[in-house]
Image (spheres, rainbow, N blue to C red):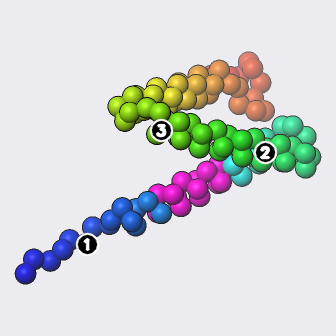
Amino acid sequence: MMRASRMATPDALFPAAIGLSAFLLFTLELVSGQQVLPVFGGTPGVWATALCFFTAVLFLGYLYAHLVATRLDPVKGGSLHLLVAGIAIVSLVLARATSRPSGCPASRRR
């Protein structure tokens, strides 16, 4: 008799992927909220605004995923997703290249 391989099935992979993505998303929310708080005064209103912002961005991400999945075929949806991811990566690189580290005078910037 042949033994069935014990590979992870989609039934196990999907909840794991969703759980990992939720963990990473909410970790990112807390870390970036902590970084923004001192810059904008550290009041509870700043924290509430950060939470509302991340909730709105999460909703827009779900809306984007829904529209791509229901309105576009897989090839066009994949191409659009690669374009959006590419724009995000280029934006992050450009923002990082043009920003100055906090506490560092402009004359000492490398």
Residue 78 visible in the picture: yes
Task: Name the residue type under label 3.
Answer: Thr
Residue 80 in percent (x, y) is at 45, 28
- Real-space Cα distance between discs 1 and 3? 33 Å
- Real-space Cα distance between discs 2 and 1? 43 Å
Q: On screen, 39 above or below 109?
A: below
Q: Does the magenta stretch include residue 21?
A: yes
- Real-space Cα distance between discs 2 and 3? 27 Å
Residue 18 in percent (x, y) is at 51, 57
Q: What element carries label 2?
A: helix
81 left or right, relative to 104: left
Which numbered marker is on residue 70? Answer: 3
Identify residue for label 1.
Answer: 6
Q: In which quarter of the image is residue 10?
A: bottom left
**Residue at image coords 55%, 29%:** 88
Residue 66 in percent (x, y) is at 53, 41
**Residue at image coords 39%, 28%:** 76
**Nearest to N terminus: mark 1 or mark 3:** 1
Which span is picked out in magenta? 16-28
